[in-house]
Each structure stands twice: as structure tokens, then as C-alpha cells.
Amino acid sequence: MDLNTICVIGAGTMGTGIAQVAAQAGLRTFVIEANVEAIPRSQKRLEKSLQGGIERGKLTEADAEEAKGRLTWVTDYEALREADWVIEAVFEDVEVKRQVWAKVAELVGAETPVASNTSTMPIKTLASYYGRPEYFIGMHFFNPPPAMKLVEVIPSVSTLPEIRDAAVALCERMGKTPLIAPDIPGFMVNRAFGALVAAAAEVWALGGEPAAIDQALELGLGHKMGPLRTSDLVGLDIIKAVHESLTELTGHDRFALPQRFYDELVNQGKLGVKSGEGFYKYDQ
């Protein structure tokens, strides 16, 4: 498949990170963001990420400049007409995604592969909003995309085998490790890890100290980072959305977060690393 230009829809943390990975892989990359105020934040986030890569020896300054040269931020969906591949990375809200995919279907080429970075929603459902399910696939990156190796590749029952194979090849071109996941709510990682986060948050709500809970699970299960610190890194607003989606889509209460999580953390704006406090406090 001739792949030169990619459009990433959404300039939040995930969209910006996916766009960076695409640009570093040599792809001409458009970031489509309807909210013009979000674009400077995305550009600042990119600069910080690239600088971090330079400082860690992962990139040279020349690599960073070349990546920036391949990136363009736009507010107009018309850029989709030039896309060889589309990745949607908007907020995990079904109505938002429904509206986005309706717009994409009007502008993108009939046989252009398209993907959603959804973390929980069944690909079959999202593909129905797009209308050409055979060219639709899930590509679930993890935060932060430039650093995290895994991408869950999720074909639906309607996805063409060649689109699945092309998605795997694109991930490999980006330097990622693609794993095929079943098209079920939460796929593999969030389906399993979501239950662990909910259980750890319940222990915290019952009086456990976050550091002790994390260390116990790190030592007991061999994890490099405990679920509460991981949640702070992801963002507790994102964790909230993921768990509410999993609970609704599966009907299982094992994904439900304790009320204290909402009362003491999310409702007070304690969203983790990005706000300076979540389960832990951080030096901004």
C-alpha cells in the first residue's frame, strides 16, 4: 500500500503523540483540530516531547526538525481529501465519535483505510457510523505514544484482511509492536487492567495508602508501575471515561470506580500528573 500522507483527528495528548510518531516515521502528517485554541497547546506538547527525546538520546536535533517539518495543524476537515490513512483520536465519547466519522465519510477516499484510537468502544459500532466497515479498523495506541511500544490492532468482523495487514505494517513502520486484539469492549489491555485499577482504587477508598498499594502490586505481580501511579500518568479524567464506558458496554460492575474516586479526586480537579495531584502529589 502506497502510504505517504496521514491525517490524525484530534490534537489532544493522544492525537499529538500519534502525529509525532507518524511524522518521525517519514509520513506527511496533518493534525485536524476543530478547536483552534487547542492547536498551540498541541504544538507546545510536541516541542516538549521532541526535546525530551533529544535529551534521552532517542532523537537528534536534525531528526526533531525533520519531524516538525512534516507536521501541519489545520482546523478544516478538507485535509482528509489528501489522506492515505486516517486515525481518529478524539475524546472517548460515543456522540463525538459519531459526528467525527460522519464528517470523515463525506471527504475521505472510498477505499482509504481509516482507524479509531478508541480505548474501549467496539470497532464494529464505530464502523457503522462511518458506513464502509470493510476499510475500518481499531489502532489503540498507549500514552504517551512516542514512548509506548504496544499498539492493539482491532479488526471487526467486516474489516478486510488486507486492511488488517496494512495496519500491522503501519505500526511496524512507526517502530511499534502491533498485537491483534478481539473486538470486545476494552480489547485486551483495558479489559484486564481496568478491573485491576478498579480493585486498587477500591482498596484506596477503604483506607489503603497509594504507595503501599502500588508497591504491593509491583512486587507481588512483577509490574514495573502500580495501577494508581499509572492512572495518574494517564489522567484520572481519562480513567473515569474508560471505566464508565467499560461498565456501560459490558454490564459488569467490576469496572466501577468507588464514589470516593469521584468526590475527592475528579470532581476537585485532581487529575494526576497533568494537574499536579491525583492519587499522588507532583511538583509541576
Image (cartoon, rainbow, N blue to C red):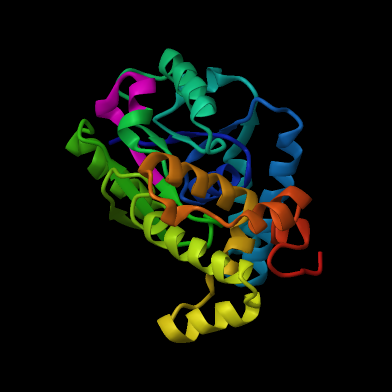
Total numbered labels placed on residues in the image = 0
Q: Where are the magenta residues, as a range?
A: 127-139
Q: Residue at x 58, y 64 (%)?
A: 59
Q: Is residue 137 magenta?
A: yes
Up/down of 184 relative to 160, above or below: below
Q: Residue furthest right?
A: 284
Q: Residue at x 49, y 30 (%)?
A: 94
Q: Position of residue 144 (x, y in %)?
A: 56, 57
Q: Nearer the viewer, residue 91 or 20?
A: 91
Q: Quadrant of the C terminus?
A: bottom right
Up/down of 265 relative to 164, above or below: below
Q: Position of residue 237 (x, y in %)?
A: 64, 49
Q: Position of residue 220 (x, y in %)?
A: 44, 85
Q: Picture quarter containing residue 120?
A: top left
Up/down of 146 relative to 250, above or below: below
Q: Residue furthest front?
A: 206
Q: Is residue 215 magenta?
A: no
